[in-house]
Amino acid sequence: MSETSNPRKQTLDKDLDKLVYVEEATTTVARGLVAPGLALLFLALTAIFAATYTFGEPRAVIIVAAAAIGAYMALNIGANDVANNVGPAVGAKAMTLGGALLIAAVFESAGALIAGGDVVSTISKGIIDPAAVGTPEAFVRAMMAALISSALWINLATWIGAPVSTTHSVVGGVMGAGIAAAGFSSVDWATMSQIAASWVISPVVGGVIAALFLAFIKTAIIYQDDKIAAARRWLPLLIAIMAGTFSAYLTLKGLKKVFPVTGGGAAIIGLAFFAVTWFLAHLFVHAQSEGLENRNQSLRSLFKVPLVISAALLSFAHGANDVANAVGPLAAIVFTVHESTVNTTVAIPLWVMVIGAAGISIGLVLFGPKLIRMVGEQITKLNPMRAFCVALSAAITVIIASGFGLPISSTHTAVGAIFGVGFFREWYTAHSKRRRAYLERKGVRLKADNGIQSNDDDDLEVEQQKTSREEVARRKLVRRAHVRTIVAAWVTTVPAAAILSAVIFLVLDLIA
């Protein structure tokens, strides 16, 4: 009897196949539970870590619970917001996802620990009037509600793949809890109006700066007959601008904890780093460009290293600015519980900063890849030159705002820069006379519908046939569906976090 006609053999094969399928399904499910499991482990370790600093203190349980909630908030910041820092570099294929996660984790932590103190005071005391909330216990419940609501909202946004502003979330949470605790009069509406204005200004400024950098790169480098010579002339300048800005910022934010540094002193240090970096960058770019062909692919290779550096810079700035979202309310809770009073001046314990820095980095590694791919690849097509403009623009904007202690939205800034690059490309492709003249010199045929055929420059959109209006709209360089979705998420975040926070505060108030 043949094996194919043996019913026992067939039954055994089917049973073995079922076992294989079950094993594969179990492995898939288990793999999906690794990240949540590690996140829960981090929360448990955070609670233990906080308990060691509050052992024997009255109401230590409140601080431990707040520390765990603050860690949960930090995890969500890392999962959602950090994508804006390294997403462009990953989308431009300047670095792998693993390398981006490593660089972002290191520089996020460094920024939070070295330069994260200034903006914390704005988050914890500048939005609501602590005296209007009432008792210290009510203020603690308000800060707890703000942390819980903002963390839950960001978690939901990350799950559905929407890059929302964590600054929006925490400010909305603090505002909603304050209104629930003491009415609308408890909110400092002047501070709120300044913060709200920064949310509008930051994406506009980020987009404009990114577009200006891209316009400069296109005009001075890409559409020059000798691209390599142009890159040798201008790329060191761009790298030096980045180094000078970063060094001045680090001087103001980091060294002032060791010895006082004035704005003039920081400017002198920044100029010194600018000059040194310009000289070294000339040597680097000249060495890297030896033997490269006179084409855009060569330019992309020259921009990769500066892009990685700019992504690291932006991660540092983000850590300095957004650690406040996690530890600002937590620091206010710790101070209020310790002193049994509400104060407008909040000291930031080092262990609180460590929780924020560690949580952001761990959340990035565990849950960040999803939004990194979305930001880097799905809004508009990025190459190293465009991504460099995005990262440098966002870094400059966030650094300036953080230096003023203003809790701007780094999400708005970075995504606004991506929008700026994409919309500028649309305008430039359709209207640039310089581009047309360059292409005509190269013998590239321009079509009546503004389509372009080129074998070398993928910055130009190729239209091979007449299309309907709907197809033209679909081929816009910035995906309009993502613009609508992201803007809707931005508009929804503050009221949603505020309403959720108010509800949570009322529930905590009933339990107390």
Image: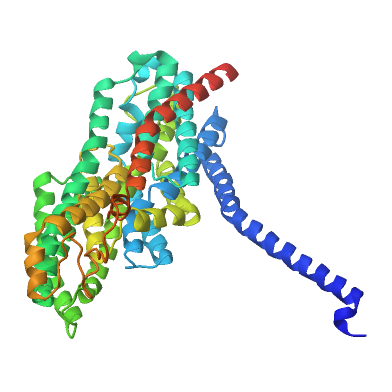
Report x, y in % for residue 83.
Answer: 38, 53
The residue shown at (90%, 78%) is: 6
371 or 333, nearer to the observer: 371
Q: Is residue 7 left or right of residue 177?
A: right
Tell me the quadrant of the picture where the N terminus can be found: bottom right
Q: Is residue 60 left or right of residue 411?
A: right
The residue shown at (11%, 68%) is: 223
| Res. 310 visible in picture | yes
Report x, y in % for residue 351.
Answer: 44, 44
The residue shown at (25%, 66%) is: 462
> What's the image's color scheme?
rainbow
Up-down relation of residue 358 to residue 330 (above or below):
below
Report x, y in % for residue 91.
Answer: 35, 62
Q: Is residue 79 left or right of residue 383?
A: right
Tell me the quadrant of the picture where the C terminus can be found: top right
| Res. 170 visible in picture | no
Report x, y in % for residue 3.
Answer: 87, 82
63 or 95, nearer to the observer: 95
401 or 471, nearer to the observer: 471
257 or 206, nearer to the observer: 206
Up-down relation of residue 54 to residue 394 (above or below):
above
Q: Toward which corner of the image does residue 229 lie, by quadrant?
A: bottom left
